[in-house]
Amino acid sequence: PPTGGTPEPHMGRHALLVIQAALVPSINSWTSLGMQFYGGQVEEFALETRGQTGLGFEYSATQRLYLRRGQIWSLPEDETSTHGLSGGITYAWDPQLCGQLLPLMRENVANLISCDDLKASLQRGFDAWAMNSRHIKFVDVSTACEKQYTLTKDCPLAEVWVAALSCEFVSALCEDNPNTDASSLTWAAAATPKFALSNSFRFTNGEYNKVGNVVQPSIEIVGGTLLFNIGTPAAPGMCWYLDSAFCSNFHAMKASFPGSTPAVQAANAKVVIIVLFWTIWLSTIALFLYNVFWVFTPRKAFWDELKEALEDGILDGEDMKELEEARKQYIKNTMKRIAKYETIAVAFIITVIVGLPLLYWQLFLPCWDCYDFEGAAVHEAGHLLGLGHPDAFPSLSQLPSFAPDIGKNVYNALLAEGSSYNSTTCINNWDAVFSGLPASADVEDETSVRNAVMESFTQNNPSQCLSADDAEGLHTLYPDCDGLFYSTMPNCIKVNLNFGVVRVFLYLGIPLLVVVWVMLVFDYFVDNYIRVPSASEIKQKVEIRRQVAGKAGAASSEELAWKENAAAAESHAPSHSSEHTVSQGLGPQRPKVGGYYREQLPPMTMRPPSQPAA
């Protein structure tokens, strides 16, 4: 739109709908392009619905074009027409756009995202508006253009061309243009409606723009371009994501932090999350290094062997053998200490060390710093339909000189209370439109604006669904008189692409599985290694067995001597008595055998077998 002077009626030009830094924040709700950029007034629009006008001869015919209703799509009376909304708003996709966007999709790990995913996401963005009005429909004619014509922006079948933000559409991006400054071109996407002069403009309620009974010329939208940023000199790190459902959790987290603006809230939340992320990561590394130090630190036995070998300052062959044996024993002891750790615990620690940075760089930051592709499509489609930004207005000095006043943020009182149009209110629908916002409106504390998808698009406020404010604007610009039941809860279908879940598995699940398998294999070899005795262990076992065998041999000799002494003592006992007593004191005391003393036998009375007991 022009920023001053009298506009020329060159209706084939494009109007770039991008709000730059010098805009004045509003405090209310939705607005239209005519109100935002030309100073159109609600009171004039309400008069026009009755065939009247408040625009006197102080305005030229051209100026009145911009100040009356219009700058939206027309609905021809002929149902077979392909003009305007008849047959839907057709669009075609630049064949080069996929190749330009896919490298900027931070989720595109292992080619998770295809060109078809991008096109489906764009269609869902358009459908967010189409499913809330029977008059709105977007149709992809890329294939038809390719088959019947050439798939370029000049394809006669396509009313909207979807392409990359470039010098071809924005002169400020041209390197050979010395009169423009591209430093402010940091927006993620831009909608550029194409306007045309119409003498038969018809609203969706079946009415024409008349004064008395004379149809007045109007400005209508007949097409446009939808441009996505693929990296500009002012935004070289541009990036996008598709999984809106997954990233919405992070955006909800931003809103829960204190801050005067969404950007400040996001900055505060990011600081907290960064501190939390890296504290956990560094603590895990410290724990891991401590255990590594404990496992691999040589014990006292190793140092004793080394000290003994170096005492005389000469390392002979025997010393080298001892040192080699000590080294092997050190390795074996180290393996034994490793075997004491739980496999799952070690695998978890290693996975955290490896996976947490990946989650931060490849999962958290894309959702935090990149732009929602589908959210951008929904927002820019609203511009293509004639809606402006509710949270930013040019100042009066930035409007054309003929503008009576700055435009207004408005609301539709009839629709805001949940009612729908009837045959009268549908025709005079602007009678219910007032400046400000309804008393029951849900207003954002930071911006003082009703929650809306048409709020200036940033990384911090993407939405794939219309709000009540957006739906009010849509049904005011495109009223439906055929009994449409208007709801303050607009229709919305959210698609969970699960790219986020897949990436979590890639960055945590797969490393965990790999580490667990490696640890299991490692444990198997460690277990086999520590089962094989070293030379020193073999010597030690042989020595123990030798000592045990020596003790057992001595014990057997003593046992044999004890038996011989007992037999000799028995042979010298008196033979005339039928009863005799054998006391343990008569023979030698039974020796200690195997480290234990056998219990001494009590005195026993021996009787001949034929003598009965008393």
Image (cartoon, rainbow, N blue to C red):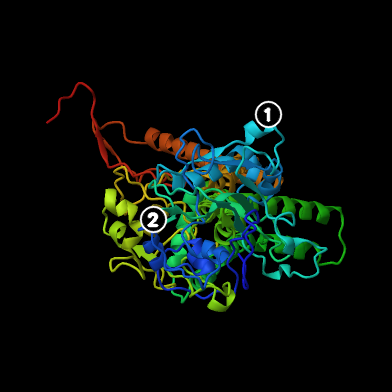
Crowding near pointer 1: few (<14 within 10 Å), some, many (20+)? few
Q: Where residue 9 appears, x then y in whole percent?
A: 62, 60
Q: Where residue 113 appears, x then y in whole percent?
A: 61, 42
Which of discs 2 and 1 lies nearer the camera? The answer is 2
What's the amino acid at mark 2? Thr
- Image height check: is 494 above or below 268? above
Residue drawn at x 42%, y 63% as measured from the top left:
30
Q: Where residue 155 appears, x then y in whole percent?
A: 67, 39
- The residues tagged by marks 2 and 1 sit, at their Cα atoms, a distance apart of 38 Å
Looking at this view, is 252 or 610 the one in front? 252
Residue drawn at x 44%, y 66% as measured from the top left:
255
Looking at this view, is 127 or 585 the one in front? 127
- Image height check: is 271 above or below 559? below
Looking at this view, is 14 or 266 the one in front? 14
On screen, residue 495 versus residue 231, left or right, reads left
Residue linked to disc 1? 147
- Farthest-out residue, bottom: 397
Quadrant position of the N terminus in the picture: bottom right
Which callout, 2 or 1, points at the residue further toward the start of the chain? Answer: 1
Looking at this view, is 72 or 22 the one in front? 72
Q: Where residue 163 appears, x then y in whole percent?
A: 66, 48
Residue drawn at x 63%, y 39% as measured from the top left:
115
Q: Give residue 181's quadrant in the image.
A: bottom right
On screen, residue 478 versus residue 521, left or right, reads left
On screen, residue 102 versus residue 89, left or right, reads right
What's the amino acid at mark 1? Lys
- Image height check: is 109 above or below 178? above
Quick one: SS at disc 1? helix
Is mark 2 in CB contact (under 8 Å) with mark 1?
no
Numbered circle sitting on residue 476: 2
